[in-house]
Image: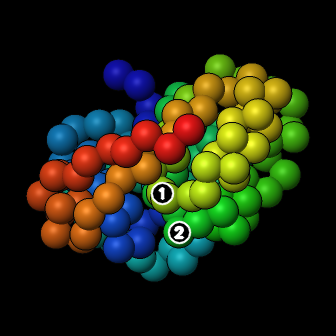
Amino acid sequence: MDRIGFLGLGTMGLPMAVNMAKAGFQLRVWNRTPEKAGPVLAAGAVEADSSAALLDWADTAVMMLSGPEAVDDALAGLVEDPGLLKGKVLVNMGTNPPAFSRQLDARLEKAGAVFVDAPVSGTQVQAMEGDFAPQASI
């Protein structure tokens, strides 16, 4: 089974990650505010010390971050680290401007990673129920 990392445990990310942990995925999580991780850790996930540690461990990383600044913060210096992201898949489920997503795709491709832009719409209720709809943005 692939090792899945999940970055961002906010309104949408936390219930999404809890559902993944409950489904039995090998899941490691990271959040800029670590104390938010309690429910997903109780569901079976493991907490990473940093976004770098999570990305080093994961085969696939799901990002449910609040916007471009949060994405840049989580990936600060990591995209330029030779070899860290090579062969990894990064799935961005947060909503970002298309221009930012295209720029991020180019940066990740240069680092040897595969970028999937898969923003979702909905509310915390849909995330808790696992009922959200992907939207194409590129």
Label 1 secondary element: loop
Mark 1 and mark 2: Cα distance apart in space? 6 Å
Identify the residue under disc 1.
Answer: 94
Q: Identify the disc placed on residue 66.
A: 2
Q: Are marks 1 and 2 in contact (CB under 8 Å)?
A: yes
Residue 5 appears in the figure: no
Q: Residue at x 12, y 58 (%)?
A: 129
- Taking the image as shown, residue 21 lies to the left or right of residue 131, namely right
Relative to 58, say whether 37 is above or below.
below
Q: Nearer the viewer, residue 137 or 32?
A: 137
Q: Position of residue 44 (x, y in %)?
A: 27, 52
Residue 99 appears in the figure: yes
Q: Residue at x 79, y 57 (%)?
A: 76
Q: Quarter of the image holding residue 39?
A: bottom left
- Taking the image as shown, residue 77 lies to the left or right of residue 96, namely right
- Name the amino acid, label 1: Gly
Disc 1 crowd rating (10 Å Cα; few below 14, some 14-19, many 20+) is: many
Mark before the other along the chain sequence, 1 or 2: 2
Q: Quarter of the image holding residue 55?
A: top right
- Name the amino acid, label 2: Ser
- Taking the image as shown, residue 134 lies to the left or right of residue 71, namely left
Q: Residue at x 82, y 27 (%)?
A: 110
